[in-house]
Image: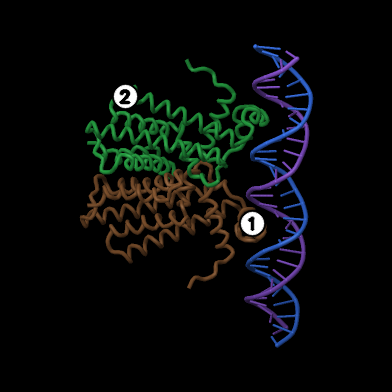
Chain colours: A green, B brown, C purple, D blue
Amino acid sequence: MKSIPSTSEKILDIAQSLIVAGGYNGFSYADISAAIGIRKASIHHHFPTKAELVAALVDRYRQQAETGLNSLRELVASPAEQLQFYLNYWDTCIRDASQPFCVCAMLAGEMQMLPEEVASRVRAHFQTLAAWLTSVLSAGAEQDLFRLNRRPEEEAQMLMASVHGAMLSARAFGDPGLFIAIITTQVAKLTK
Amino acid sequence: MKSIPSTSEKILDIAQSLIVAGGYNGFSYADISAAIGIRKASIHHHFPTKAELVAALVDRYRQQAETGLNSLRELVASPAEQLQFYLNYWDTCIRDASQPFCVCAMLAGEMQMLPEEVASRVRAHFQTLAAWLTSVLSAGAEQDLFRLNRRPEEEAQMLMASVHGAMLSARAFGDPGLFIAIITTQVAKLTK
DNA sequence: TGCTATCTACCTATCAGTAGGAAGGTTATG
DNA sequence: CATAACCTTCCTACTGATAGGTAGATAGCA
């Protein structure tokens, strides 16, 4: 079922884990080279510059995220469950350390010194995610599943901030369980 | 009143703004050198290694923060106002771009690749801040100013995550006003 | 034949860090 | 008080390592 990954995809996989660990300036072509056993120059064949590599990475990430969120809408009817699945996804990622941080949240912190082609894509991801959360929250409110104290857009912003902040806290304290602890508290206030 | 800053302090000032902009790997001795008009080697005189420089920076930051939070307790009696002053401080910093991000929150994101002497200090700051927020929240709850749905420690964790997450959002969207928008929504749920 | 992927070998710029010395101020000693 | 010794701060000049990136060749595949 799972096709063998191409070299380009392997490069992006490694780059993603390196960025999540140390940000844009926290990895080099040499790191990727060492990780997948290919020469530095060969990576430049696939991605001529570092900015292009990370831009491609964010594009892939955005597409995966969008696909995931949309399929969530089809697979799970209830907005409350959609939200829960989203949060469980991150909880699992953080717990098994497979992806303990959102790559776009990481890059957002470095926004001021990112190449423009990367920065614009990170901004776009935040827009997309905020829009998805907004639609889930307002659908849930209509079905009387959520109790919103503010406009859905505001609640969505707040929830998104909590999710990314909780990732930060979990990492700062070195405690994966802290993520869901924070988020559960947050969501409890939302749920009827 | 305000004494002229020593070279060491100027170095830390610049380093702090550079870290806030781009993280631990986002600045170099050459950057500091250019910014304050001193040779690279002279910076090594004050701070032999980069790790020591950043460790000293976090120490200074922690001390300033602790002093600020403690004096807040003396100057303002009400826990509700103490919390409001803390949040206003960050709102002002972000609005005038003087310090649009907490240096420890920035470093927390890079935790996995920080030198241990830096990482431990960042962890300590998070502990201190969480403890301060916990004490403010529980004092406020006793005085019937706050309505806490969870234990004070949990609410404090949640609030801290929201503050740092809101910083991230404000930066991602390039909208300084977003910080206080998110935080106000959050605090409204807390306040009676 | 041409295209794709990889290689070796190399480039220039920058990284953190060091060696050693010049200038000026402070302190200890006669 | 004079001066020698020392200390602090900054400098020029350098090091080895690594950064991102390039040139050009090779091998296999369509």
Q: Position of residue A171 (x, y in %)?
A: 44, 41
Q: Marks 1 and 2, Cα distance to the nearest angstrom?
A: 56 Å
Residue pictured at 51% horizontal, 31% vertical = A59
Q: Position of residue B99 (x, y in %)?
A: 47, 55
Determine the chain carrying the residue at label 2. Answer: A
Task: Name the residue nearer the viewer: D21 or A142.
Answer: A142
Residue pictured at 50% horizontal, 51% vertical = B20
Amino acid type shown at disc 1: Ala
- Position of residue A29 relative to residue B157, above or below, is above
Task: Name the residue nearer the viewer: D1 or D5.
Answer: D1
Tag 1 and tag 2 share a subunit: no
Q: Is residue B84 left or right of residue B1?
A: left
Q: Is residue A58 left or right of residue B81?
A: right
Local crowd size for mark 2, using a 10 Å CA cut-off: few (<14), some (14–19), many (≥20): few
Task: Name the residue nearer the viewer: B100 or B135.
Answer: B100
Q: Position of residue A130 (x, y in %)?
A: 38, 37
Q: Position of residue A24 (x, y in %)?
A: 55, 40
What count of labels does the image hold? Answer: 2
Residue pictured at 26% horizontal, 39% vertical = A190
Local crowd size for mark 1, using a 10 Å CA cut-off: few (<14), some (14–19), many (≥20): few
Task: Name the residue nearer the viewer: B36 or A124.
Answer: A124
Which residue in the protein does label 1 denote?
B34
Q: Is residue B144 left or right of residue A123?
A: left
Among the 4 quarters of the image, the one containing residue A50 = top right
Residue pictured at 53% horizontal, 32% vertical = A57
| Secondary structure of the residue carrying numbered label 2 | loop
Q: Is residue A101 left or right of residue D24?
A: left
Which residue in the protein does label 2 denote?
A76
Residue closest to the far left: B144
- Position of residue B156 relative to residue D29, above or below, is below
| Secondary structure of the residue carrying numbered label 1 | helix
